Image: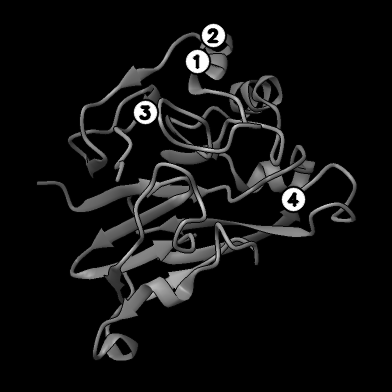
Amino acid sequence: MGKLKITWHGHSCFTLEEEGYSIVLDPFEDGAVPGFGNLRLEADQVLCSHEHFDHNAVQCVKIREGAASKKNPFRITEIHSWHDDAEGTKRGSNIIRVYDDGEYRIAHMGDIGCPPTAEQKEALKGIDVMLMPVGGFFTMEPEDVCALVGELKPRMLVPMHYRGSGFGYDVIAPLEKYASLCGGVMQLDRNELSLPEDLQSGTVALAPPLG
């Protein structure tokens, strides 16, 4: 098994685990996202990109005993951005977070709604795994995501926040739309990655944990 594990719980929710320390990102409320079951997770920390119900359900994550005294293997950088293309006047703010363990850099893009600034793009260069919303409507549209990814060139992109068979919001686009623009997607039959074993170039979609 790799030193770093990334698990997708559906929508934009992931767990990062390394050296016995785990962080849950963007948990969603019970019944908030069609197709996905209720989250009941344990972790040492929970972080949210913004305060919408499908991203901020900290009550669904039980913080482990002694978490405050454990060493966090990740250096976390916050990049403040917008959830829309009107400087937050439509949907508010969004926090992109980069998790750096000294060997790998993982970026969770939250509900990014507009292209990053030049300064933000500089901070997002050299990403090994980018967790990126590709469904549009509430976030950047698939064609804009494709252009951004082409510019930033993360080593691996893991799609999130899209519509699939039996899950996701009706108004957001299916993964196939992004795939048709970006040159294809490799679909895994599991919802987790281990690094370095699973690190590869291109777009890799994890299996949706339905139910």
Decide which of tag 3 and tag 2 comes sooner along the chain.
Answer: 2
Q: Nearer the viewer, mark 1 or mark 3?
A: 1
Foreground residue among 38 and 10: 38
**What crowding class fits label 4: few (fewer than 14 Cα within 10 Å), some (14-19), or many (20 or more)?**
many
Label 3 with label 2: CB-CB less than 8 Å: no
Foreground residue among 191 and 82: 191
What amino acid is found at the position of numbered circle 2 in the picture? Ser
Label 1 with label 4: CB-CB less than 8 Å: no
| Left or right for 171, reference 169 | right
Inter-mark Cα distance, 4 to 3: 23 Å
Numbered mark located on residue 83 in the image: 4
What amino acid is found at the position of numbered circle 3 in the picture? Ala
Residue placed under numbered mark 1 in the picture: 176
Residue 127 visible in the snapshot: no
Decide which of tag 2 and tag 4 comes sooner along the chain.
Answer: 4
Assign a secondary structure to mark 4.
loop
Decide which of tag 4 and tag 3 comes sooner along the chain.
Answer: 4
Residue placed under numbered mark 3 in the picture: 205
Inter-mark Cα distance, 1 to 3: 11 Å
Which residue shows up at 53% across the image and 39% down it? Answer: 161
